[in-house]
């Protein structure tokens, strides 16, 4: 008896992950996007990080929406939940951007158990590093998620580039990819711009069937003039213009990520 497919999307945020999820017709991704189960489990060995995670995610609204508490989760419960939701579908998807940050030791520890239950495939979608980071920073700035006191999104963006930030680790594309790939998972890195320009041969080969891509606000890049698309309002986050000068400056700082991004298929 063949095993159901589990597609784990491990980021990156602000790179059309929600659009990609909607594109995988025939898969059950109705659990929720961003359930954070695996990510939460990976933090249990670090009390301070896990306590911070629980304080952020274990709200009454999230419990009602998702139907579970993270404190009650185990790997076996995760597997049972996804097996149950794969019945009658091509497979099941876990679209949680924070999966990109899961510690390699934890990935190594759970690998055999996941593969016993599923045909595991991991996809990671990457957008132009500077434009992705600017969209992420814009969302954090506009919603005050990082508690920044900067006078503009642009000032916050430059500060993140020059001084780093614990809130914006997904700018480190190479590290995020290696976390999964080096542990022997079947990982397919995707350049967002390439698939939305029509080149989906390798992606369709990876999932095993043709794909009709759901639209994204991120392609073509229009910044503050990006269209508002039904079901993915969160993609319209840019509220300030990213100048060409700032783009080139940021590109120089993130040059190592461009080496990785430029060679993606």
Image (tube, rainbow, N blue to C red):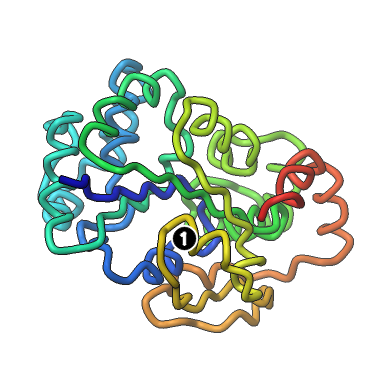
Circle 1 packing at 10 Å, graded few (<14), some (14-19), many (20+), is many
* 201 shown above or below 178: below
- 211 lies above or below 49: below
Residue 40 at x, y = what percent?
A: 30, 33
Location of residue 128 in the rendering, given as x and y in whole percent from the top left corner: 70, 58
Q: Which of 83 and 69 is in front in this view?
A: 83
Q: Which residue lies furthest to the front in this view?
A: 1
Left or right placement of residue 4 versus residue 134 in this view: left
User: Which quarter of the rendering shows the N terminus?
Assistant: top left
At mark 1, the secondary structure is helix
Where's residue 173, x and y in %? 63, 41
Of residues 65 and 59, the one drawn nearer to the viewer in this rendering: 65
Nearer to us in this view, 168 or 83: 83
Residue at (37%, 76%) from the top-left corner?
231
Total numbered labels placed on residues in the image: 1
Q: Residue at x 20, y 57 (%)?
A: 31
Quadrant in which the C terminus is drawn = bottom right
- Looking at the image, residue 150 sits to the left or right of residue 255; the answer is left
Q: Where is residue 74 in the image (x, y as percent from the top left)?
A: 16, 29
Side of 262 where 51 appears, left or right:
left
Q: Residue drawn at (69%, 52%), measured in percent from left and top?
A: 129
For label 1, the residue is: 17
Q: Is residue 68 or residue 12 the one in the foreground? A: 12
Q: Quadrant of residue 193?
A: bottom right
Q: Residue at point 34% right, 35% down? A: 39
């Amino acid at each position: 008896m063949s095993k159901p497919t589990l597609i784990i999307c491990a980021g990156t945020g602000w790179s059309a992950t929600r659009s990609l999820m909607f594109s995988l017709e025939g898969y059950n991704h109705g659990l929720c996007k961003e359930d954070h189960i695996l990510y939460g489990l990976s933090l249990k060995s670090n009390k301070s990080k896990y306590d911070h995670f629980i304080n952020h995610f274990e709200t009454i609204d999230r419990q009602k929406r998702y139907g579970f508490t993270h404190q009650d989760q185990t790997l076996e419960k995760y597997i049972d939940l996804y097996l149950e939701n794969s019945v009658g579908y091509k497979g099941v998807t876990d679209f949680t951007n924070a999966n990109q940050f899961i510690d390699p030791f934890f990935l190594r520890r759970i690998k055999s158990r996941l593969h016993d239950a599923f045909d595991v495939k991991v996809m990671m979608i990457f957008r132009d590093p500077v434009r992705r980071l600017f969209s992420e920073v814009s969302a954090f700035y506009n919603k005050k998620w990082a508690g920044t006191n900067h006078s503009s999104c642009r000032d916050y963006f430059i500060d993140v580039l020059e001084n780093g930030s614990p809130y914006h680790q997904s700018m480190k594309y190479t590290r995020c990819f290696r976390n999964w790939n080096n542990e022997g998972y079947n990982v397919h890195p995707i350049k967002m711009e390439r698939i939305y320009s029509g080149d989906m041969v390798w992606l369709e080969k990876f999932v095993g069937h043709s794909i009709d891509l759901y639209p994204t606000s991120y392609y073509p890049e229009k910044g503050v003039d990006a269209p508002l698309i039904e079901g993915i309002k969160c993609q319209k986050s840019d509220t300030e213009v990213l100048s060409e000068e700032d783009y080139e400056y940021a590109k120089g700082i993130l040059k190592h990520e461009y080496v990785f991004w430029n060679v993606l298929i």
